[in-house]
Image: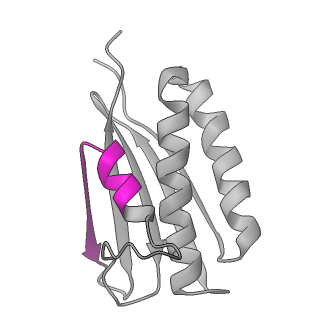
Amino acid sequence: MMAEETFERAMIATPSAVGLLRDLAEAHLRKWGLCALVDDALLVASELITNAVRARPRSLIGFRLVRQRAVLRIEVYDTSPGRAVITPSPDGGRGLVIVEALAREWGQRAEPAGGKSVYALLDLPVS
């Protein structure tokens, strides 16, 4: 049975945080041998991180990757109390539509200390 592996990082919500967290995520996905999942996982991570940066610019955001037995959990925390909703519009807002299309499941929860975490589960490739 495979042990759970986790990567976590917190940083200030700036546009450059998206690229930095994406690069760190890619390094960990490759280290964990999840090369086949890199493209979809990075797209999902980018969308969730971008939403957090837009919701609360210059505040603290948290990013977590968790490799479990059959799934990869991608989770982003921000200090916004508002729920993430799918609201595509002609000028953007398609991030959660993309997440919904690529993930087995996605959702969110209010955090006891305030803010929310939005997560997506991606199936691990069958080896």
Would you say 13 lies left or right of 7 here? right
Task: Give the vertical position of 54 relative to 66 (above or below).
Answer: below
Residue drawn 41% across the image and 43% down it: 66
Which residue is situated farthest in the top direction here? 127
Task: Give the vertical position of 113 relative to 62 (above or below).
Answer: below
Q: Please tell me whether residue 98 belongs to the stretch shown in magenta.
A: yes
Which quadrant of the view contains residue 106? bottom left
Which residue is situated farthest in the front direction here? 90
**Viewport quadrant of the N terminus:** top left
The span shown in magenta is 97-110
Image spot of residue 96 (x, y percent) = 37, 63
Q: Nearer the viewer, residue 10 or 15?
A: 15
Residue drawn 53% across the image and 47% down it: 43
Image spot of residue 100 (x, y percent) = 30, 53
Task: Give the vertical position of 105 relative to 59 (above or below).
Answer: above
Image spot of residue 71 (x, y percent) = 30, 34
Which residue is situated farthest in the right direction here? 16
Task: Give the vertical position of 61 relative to 3 (above or below).
Answer: below
Image spot of residue 81 (x, y percent) = 36, 90
For the image, the number of numbered tags is 0
**Viewport quadrant of the C terminus:** top left
Q: Please tell me whether residue 100 belongs to the stretch shown in magenta.
A: yes
Would you say 36 lies left or right of 123 here? right
Residue drawn 60% across the image and 44% down it: 25
Residue drawn 66% across the image and 62% down it: 18
Q: How is the image coloured?
A: one colour
Which quadrant of the view contains residue 5? top left
